[in-house]
Image (spheres, rainbow, N blue to C red):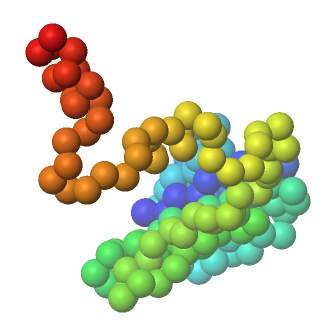
Amino acid sequence: MTIIILTACPEGLRGHLTQWLLEISAGVYVGRVNSRIRHRLWAKVVDMAGPGRALLVYQQPGEQRLSFKVHDHHWEPVDHDGITLMRRPTQRTSHNPALPAGWSKASKRRRFGRRTPQAPNEVPTSLKQSEGKSSS
């Protein structure tokens, strides 16, 4: 089974892929072709993709039984102990200058509170004051 997913690719490439694969959704092609045809299709995708992105998923002998290839994609396949995983980029690509840097006042209050440090066996001052008022 071979799956090719295209994003923002030219119509000519989409038409070429429909000769070999079935388009089950916009930009998603599925079919069963041999490895020689799959390699030629992928070479054509890489050649004709232009500004678009492409992802190829196909059967491969092994524990996972599939493999990935990507073209101009932010996510990249990474081998981790014999299993291919997709690594997402971790760094931010855009920064919003409208947001201030650092912690907000509310988060600082929540994190640190408005309490003063006390000894472990000492009664808080608020309880001492309320006890004194109730006895009079």
What residue is shown at x 26% (from left), y 25% (from top)? 129
Residue 85 drawn above or below residue 135: below
Say left or right for 104 vs 96.
left
| Quadrant position of the C terminus in the picture | top left
| Quadrant position of the N terminus in the picture | bottom left
Image coordinates of residue 67 in percent, x first then y, are 47, 75
What residue is shown at x 31% (from left), y 52% (from top)? 118
Q: Which quadrant would residue 105 be assigned to in this image? A: top right
Say left or right for 15 vs 22.
right
Residue 123 drawn above or below residue 67: above
Image coordinates of residue 7 in percent, x first then y, are 72, 49
Pick whichever, 9 or 41, lies toward us: 9
Pick whichever, 13 or 113, lies toward us: 113
Q: Which residue reaches farthest left?
A: 135
Residue 13 visible in rendering:
no
- Count of numbered labels shown in the rendering: 0
Residue 101 visible in rendering:
yes
Say left or right for 73 vs 68.
right
Q: Which quadrant would residue 75 be assigned to in this image? A: bottom right
Image coordinates of residue 21 in percent, x first then y, are 58, 53
What residue is shown at x 76% (from left), y 57% (from top)? 93
What residue is shown at x 76% (from left), y 43% (from top)? 100
